[in-house]
Amino acid sequence: MPPSHENETTTAEITRRSQSNLAFALRLLPAERRQDMADFYAFCRVIDDLADDPATTSEAKRAALSRWRVGLADAFGGAPSGVVERATVALLEKHELPAEWLIEIVTGCEADIDVKRYATFEELRAYCYRVASVVGLVSARIFGCVRLESEQYAVNLGYALQITNILRDVGEDFREDGRIYLPAEDMARFGYGEGDLAAAAYDERFRALMEFEAARADAYFAASLGYLTAEDRPALRAAEGMRRIYSAILSRMRRDGFRVFERRYRLSKPRMLWCVLRAYLD
């Protein structure tokens, strides 16, 4: 059977156990919105786990995700079962969220079942939109944003965060799943092939490729700030905390020459706390 968090005591516990950067940044939210975001994160966690469980067949994964897709479209027929289903349906109603947004997230996670390569950056960007930018759109609505500019803030920040994740996890993704998120057209541009990645070849070609992708993330980080309005800035403090955390991770990778084959880049809790406090104070 696919993994499920339906027996967890609360969605807040799912968020705490994740020890994710998002869980850290959510401390900036008022209690009610923090709980709503915990509910949304629990949904994302369940969907991601269903798609990634190595002990489940592809057919079973698709069936489980299809059930969620259908359920989201009709609020599970008015009878959601389990903690996460009930919390998700309540979120859709409370924040008037388009069900299509959450269905996009399901579709994005489902791609990880079969898609192991991306030929172009446009293909990758479509994936990033579903698994990260749409998450940002939902989050902005839960945060209480009222300006349309905040949707573009969320979309651009989602791209930046996901590209940063991809760069950080290049070696791990290939070792564990044989998956390459780096676009094939970009790898070809720098003469860095799949065989090089399999051998964890660390050289000038690899560093140039990583810098090329990091510049894309930088551009999306910068673009997101262009849509940050004074009216919605207080509501987006948690998102700004995430922006600062991931921007710092990207800067650390760059300063270290992108040694992602031998280490996993992360920030210490004091450094993350500083990023979150800066987001609050600014």
Image (cartoon, rainbow, N blue to C red):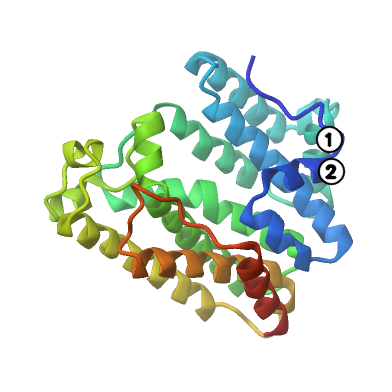
Badge 2: residue crowd in 10 Å (few <14, some 14–19, many ≥20):
some
Q: Secondary structure at mark 2?
A: helix
Residue 81 coordinates in the image, percent (x, y): 83, 25
Q: Are marks 2 and 1 in contact (CB under 8 Å)?
A: yes
Horizontal arrangement in the rendering, residue 11 relative to residue 215 (left or right): right
- In the foreground, 111 or 5: 5
Task: Identify the residue shown where x is 33% and y is 59%.
Answer: 258
Instruction: Locate the N terminus by quadrant.
Output: top right
For the residues labelled 2 and 1, the Cα–Cα distance comes to: 6 Å
x, y percent for residue 102? 64, 43
Is residue 262 at least partly visible in the picture? yes
Q: In terms of depth relative to the viewer, which is nearer, 19 or 100?
A: 19
Q: Quick one: quadrant of the C terminus?
A: bottom right
Q: Which residue is mark 1?
A: 86
Is 161 left, or right, of 93 in this rendering?
left
Counting from the top left corner in percent of width and height, residue 230 is at 67, 85
| Foreground residue among 135 and 48 | 48
Q: Amino acid at mark 1?
A: Arg
Q: Which label belongs to residue 90?
A: 2
Residue at 35% x, 43% y is 171
Mark 1, other Cα within 10 Å: few <14 / some 14–19 / many ≥20:
some
Tell me where residue 271 appears, x and y as whole percent.
Answer: 61, 70
In the picture as drawn, the residue positioned furthest to the left comes out as 191
- Asked if residue 148 can be seen in this view, the reply is no
Residue 111: numbered disc: none
* Snapshot quadrant of residue 103: top right
